[in-house]
Image (cartoon, rainbow, N blue to C red):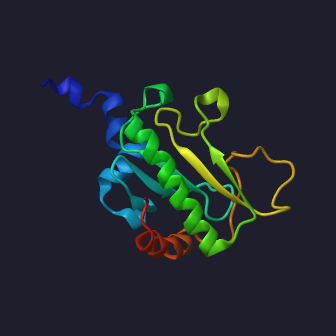
Amino acid sequence: MSVTHLWAPWRLEFIKGNPPQGCVFCTLPAANDDRESLIVHRGKTCFVILNKFPYNNGHLMVVPFEHTNVFQNLTPEVLTEIQTLSQLCLRVLSERYQPQGFNLGMNLGEAAGAGIKGHLHQHIVPRWTGDTNFMPVLAETRCLPQHLLACYDDLVPLFQKATPQ
Ligand SMILES: [Zn+2]
């Protein structure tokens, strides 16, 4: 506990609050403000969250609570819930937005385009004919007309109504 350490520049940077080193998929569920965090549904081992940088309106992600990026180490329980929650997402999105198709999948690792590479997540992207013909399918670069919170408020009641099997 020396004075020197209190004034160390790296310490100042830390206090000034640069982006937290913690993983966003770990900190958001722990924050317990699901609307602010855009968490639309919580399962047992995984949760469902709206993508803040969506590719399309209603772009959801299914994320294990456990911090991991090693798909091959996921337990059968987590694997199963990723898929049952993905089914639930498709039901809810179909009911609310009537998309004409979906992209479902994971970008594992930076080379594959993972935005948050330390914590794997499954994308569920509703698609409409003609919504794009040149962008990489799971790239997260588009801006949306509909505000994310409006989308959140649209979807949450549907998630509450539905139940994963
Ligand atoms: Zn994490």
Residue 68 in picture, x, y percent from top left: 42, 32
Position of 16 relative to 133 (above/below): above
Number of disc labels = 0
The furthest residue to the front: 165
Residue 59 in picture, x, y percent from top left: 61, 58
Name the quadrant of the N terminus. top left
Position of 69 relative to 126 (above/below): above
Residue at 38% from the left image edge and 52% from the top image edge: 28
Say left or right for 13 vs 135: left
Camera-side residue: 17 or 89? 89
**Residue 146 shows up from this direction:** no
The furthest residue to the left: 1
Residue 74 in picture, x, y percent from top left: 42, 32
Residue 37 in picture, x, y percent from top left: 42, 59
Residue at 61% from the left image edge and 29% from the top image edge: 110
Say left or right for 48 vs 13: right
Name the quadrant of the C terminus. bottom left
**Residue 144 shows up from this direction:** yes
Q: Quadrant location of residue 90?
A: bottom right
Say left or right for 135 vs 126: right
Residue at 49% from the left image edge and 26% from the top image edge: 72
Position of 86 relative to 67 (above/below): below
Residue at 43% from the left image edge and 26% from the top image edge: 73
